Image (spheres, helix red, strand yellow):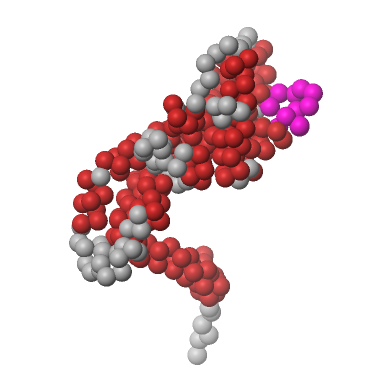
Amino acid sequence: MTATVPLPATPAAKGGGRAVRTLPFIAPSVAVLLVWMIVPLAMTLWFSFQRYNLLNPFLTGFAGVENYQYLFEDPALWSALANTLLLVGWVLVSTVVLGTLFAVLFDQDFFGRGVARLFVIAPFFVMPTVSALIWKNLLMHPVNGFFAYVSRSLGLPVIDWFTNIPLTAIIVMVAWQWVPFATLILLTAIQSLDRDQMEAARMDGAKSIALFRYIIVPHLMRPIAIVVMIETLFLLSIFAEILVTTSGGPGVATTNLTYLIYVRALLEFDVGGASAGGVVAIILANIIAFFLIRTIARNLTA
């Protein structure tokens, strides 16, 4: 009678055993996340095909694509989409450019650098509603604001920001909040730059502009891509700044897609139409996220 010798477990078998052992611990969290994501999405899809108006509870039933048809025939939707893309685009450009410049500046050694870094990063921790109130009443007010005081002191015409250039005013406010985030990420990336490479370039006669163009900027391309992706996903849902300052006006000049959904749901009480707008917002966010993730993945593998 021959004895059988047990074979050692293969790495794949060991990995499978670990997965089986950890599954009971992971499953509850995964289930909660799935319910948290799928239930709201399913309800939004369901209501987008229903006649559901809070002012008329007797108006019910299956609406088919009527909500979507009404939404796409409304000129406010296309204006909101344009404002959303303009807002996201200009804020991204502003934050990446200023964040890069601040990161390069605060990487230098100068007196009070720690305090200066603190002041630059601090706006990121201000709540959007508080930030909007500060900009509206203390800085951009056409009579009592700081910008109006400076304009009158210099003999220049006073700008009524929220009447003449309302979308620009929103862009300035939002960019002020997100520049610290870009600065923090890019400053951390610059500190990981190989200093020997910089010194070698200086010894070869490279000037500051050449160092910035050929060494610093290529080193920051991956962090910039990550900043763009994270900011974009948050900027698509900008709401508090618009509600506090312009309420989407004048007209629909500052109405983005998020604020349009709010108007449909809580001002016009059209839950079905608002849900259709929510579906459009989800599709738009996923399209943008798809291309951003592909771009970042390409940069990371390059």
Residue 41 visible in image = yes
Q: Is residue 45 above or below residue 7?
A: above
Q: Residue furthest top?
A: 205
Residue 192 visible in image = no
Comparing 125 with 215, the one in front is 125
Q: Residue at x 46, y 65 (%)?
A: 36
Q: Quadrant of the C terminus?
A: top left
Magenta extent: 106-117
Left or right of 112? Residue 202 is left
Comparing 75 with 9, the one in front is 75
Quadrant assignment, res 58: bottom left
Q: Residue furthest right?
A: 111
Left or right of 232? Residue 49 is left
Question: Residue 15 at x, y = what percent?
Answer: 51, 67
Question: Residue 133 at x, y = what percent?
Answer: 58, 40
Q: Residue at x 36, y 38 (%)?
A: 252
Comparing 76 with 289, the one in front is 76
Q: Residue at x 45, y 30 (%)?
A: 163
Is 24 inside the magenta-drawn segment? no
Quadrant assignment, res 186: top right
Question: Residue 21 at x, y = what percent?
Answer: 55, 74
Q: Residue furthest bottom?
A: 1
Question: Residue 167 at x, y = what percent?
Answer: 44, 32
Comparing 228 with 18, the one in front is 228
